[in-house]
Amino acid sequence: MNANDLTLKVVDLCKTYTLGKIEVPAVIGVSCEVKRGEFVAITGPSGCGKSTFMHLIGCLDKPTTGKIYLDGDNVAEFDDNQLAAIRNKKIGFVFQSFNLLPRMNAEKNVSLPLYYADVKAEERDRRAHAMLDQVALEKRAHHKPAEMSGGERQRIAIARALINNPAIILADEPTGNLDSKTSVDIMRIFQDINKKGATIVVVTHEPDIVRYARRVIKLKDGHIIGDEPVEQVII
């Protein structure tokens, strides 16, 4: 496989937490690759290591051992400042709890990554409106999170994740706080942006959500136990 086709490559990744005198392995010798433009679901039972794995590939935590190549850079070797820069430039995050700033309206929440990237205000506003239009919320640009539904908040979070044109979008249980109908709407949005070329990795324990992806990686006890195409993808 050509290296230019890869967004993410993980080699023999391990993460062990130390609790007093006890060492607790969370991710054990995991290796995998995600090609540019893929839509991958990571699933497994509670405590299997999927959230830890997400934090590692999202540069929110450092591995104990192993390598993480994001767009060709081994981010496992980066210091905290370098990791912060990678998170802002290369990774779009979507969380179960939305992680929106309550005092900011939708437009300002969406444009926040551009502020930290020193993009001028006029350009921030222009790009934020374009992203809000992409998730069909341009009319809610000046509403604050408390004035929106859970589904609208998650769409704002997706727009924010897209604003910097990241190498990869990481979504951690993105439908966990949503009802079934709204969950379908959110997963349709992920499918739409994937069709436009976005690379997406979704962590979920819900079988119905897995079926919106094209490939599923299954974890158990910190190991990959399955990596295969999704059967009967919901289109």
Image (cartoon, helix red, strand yellow):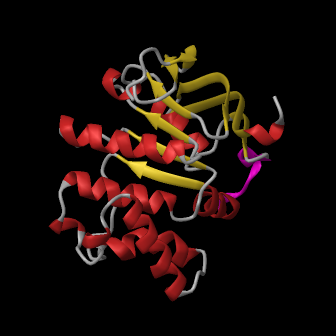
How many numbered badges does the structure rendering display? 0
Judge whether 73 appears above or below 147 on screen. above
Pick out the residue farthest to the right. Answer: 2
Q: Quadrant of the N terminus?
A: top right
Left or right: where 72 falls relative to 218? right
Identity of the residue drawn at 59% across and 60% down: 165
Q: Quadrant of the C terminus?
A: top left
Residue range (magenta): 73-80
Identity of the residue drawn at 64% across and 23% down: 30
In the image, is residue 77 part of the stretch drawn in magenta?
A: yes
Note whether residue 102 is visible: yes
Q: Position of residue 200 (x, y in %)?
A: 53, 41
The image quadrant that residue 43 belongs to is top left
Q: Position of residue 185 (x, y in %)?
A: 28, 43
Left or right: where 32 falls relative to 124? right
Pick out the residue farthest to the top. Answer: 225
Identity of the residue drawn at 65% across and 29% down: 14
Left or right: where 66 falls relative to 119? right
Q: Position of residue 130 (x, y in %)?
A: 45, 69
Note whether residue 176 is visible: no
